[in-house]
Amino acid sequence: MEAEAISRKDLRDGISRRGFMQIAGMAGVAVGVAGGIARAEGAIGYHAMDLSDEDLTQMLRTILRIRWHERTMADRMLSDPNYRAYNHFYAGQEAVATGVCAALRNEGPFDQIDLVYSTHRPTGHALAKGVDMGRMQAEFDFRATGINGGYAAEMHISDPSVGFIGADGMIGPGHVIATGSAFAFRARGSDQVSVVFGGDGTYATPHFHSALNNARLLDLPFIYVLENNLYHQYAHYSYSCPHTDIADAARAYGIPARVVDGQDVFQVYNAAKEAVDRARAGGGPTFIEAKTYRYYNHWGAPGADVGQLGAFGYDPLAITSFRPEREVRAWMQRDPVDIARDTLIDWGVLTAEGAEMLEAEVRSEVDTAFAWAAEQPLCTPEDGLRHVFVEGEVIPRQIA
Ligand SMILES: Cc1ncc(C[n+]2csc(CCOP(=O)(O)OP(=O)(O)O)c2C)c(N)n1
Ligand SMILES: [Mg+2]
């Protein structure tokens, strides 16, 4: 795997973030010193170390918000037989959505913010882009005050106000629509960027290839983030893709492509920042392949227990048997929460106590969001027919 050069080990072997800044300042240079750090800076040109302590801490907060939202939901699904919502859990992959969205413009008028097109596994992308957790949970709980009125469930959530164009139950078509947005940005002279997330399973769709080809031919401000979690549903990606690094497929279309460690939010951020800056400057598309892993089953929480992170089990008749337990455990040892937290402590951005307080704050926010959602009114059958046909007066522009 051709991962980015920078890693926590590089940092430990080199010098701490603050030490680096001091040395760089004294020597009057920004990069070019200190072994591993200099290598990474030179290779990438941007670095999370340029961010404020507040912005760095915000990334850990986002990872924790995704993680605890999911663990709370998984526990509910496992412990309450009357609980009807379900989820394609994102746990294990949190650093990917977080690192990418941290490099995007997420606030402002709709014609200025960057857009994110998501997948059937959308909650991490949604939270990282800025979707309100309470209203998203209300949506999952079929509440009328949910983010889409309670009838979008998980795979159709969207919130244009933060540029989250939405989840997509179909594998592939979203890529083509995302390139359409990128084309619109270019045609209008906007510096907005269109980002699509896709899994390793999308390689085998025509939309993957069509989107990349057109993005290159038209030099669109388009970023493809491929989350390679090794499996599509219950099959290893080698069953449908001849490449070890799917990034090689993007390179074949002439698109700059990077393979990053998807468990390390700062590596993901580095690659995303570089891609966003290139796209805004008119430099065209970028492909990022994040090597990552999902801890739960393809969907739902079979093989999981209340209070336990991840799904396990070898039952040959159970759907959880598609991957070895030791593989799940090996990936969980490179957990994105631990990597982000330990890196920030190494860099002197956070203390261990500060990190604990942050996690406690997040858990309380998640509890509040679930409690609020549970009190909201359920949507009605009539609500299901809203937004199917145009409501109110039809103006010519709508039917032209
Ligand atoms: C066009 C289409 N074909 C099949 C499916 C059924 N399906 C749902 S998720 C999935 C696998 C997706 O795998 P991947 O892209 O690797 O994403 P992951 O689930 O690993 O996040 C499939 C085949 C679908 N939703 N859409
Ligand atoms: Mg996959």
Image (cartoon, rainbow, N blue to C red):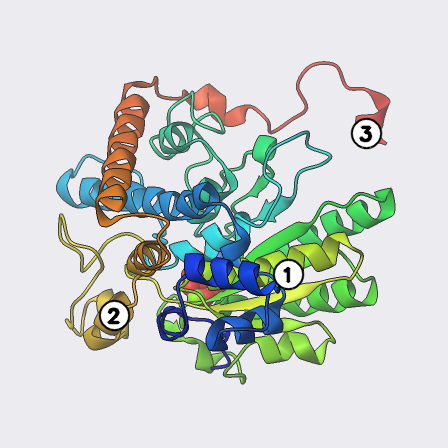
Residue that lies at the very extreme toward the front in this rendered image: 26
The residue that mark 2 highlights is 328
Q: Is residue 225 visible?
A: no
Q: CA distance from mark 3 to mark 2?
A: 51 Å
Query: Residue at 73% of width from left, 76% of height from top?
Result: 253
Percent position of residue 42, x then y: 61, 72
Crowding at dot 2, Cα within 10 Å, few <14 / some 14-19 / many 20+, comes out as: some
Tell whether label 2 touches label 3 (CB within 8 Å): no
Q: Circle 3 — which element?
A: helix
Viewer-side label of 2, 1: 1
Quarter holding the C terminus is top right
Q: Is 179 placed above or below 20 here?
A: above
Percent position of residue 285, x then y: 71, 63
Crowding at dot 3, Cα within 10 Å, few <14 / some 14-19 / many 20+, comes out as: few
What residue type is disc 1 on? Glu
What residue type is disc 3 on? Ile
Residue that lies at the very extreme toward the top in this rendered image: 393
The residue that mark 1 highlights is 274
Q: Which residue is at the front of the view, 246 or 49?
A: 49
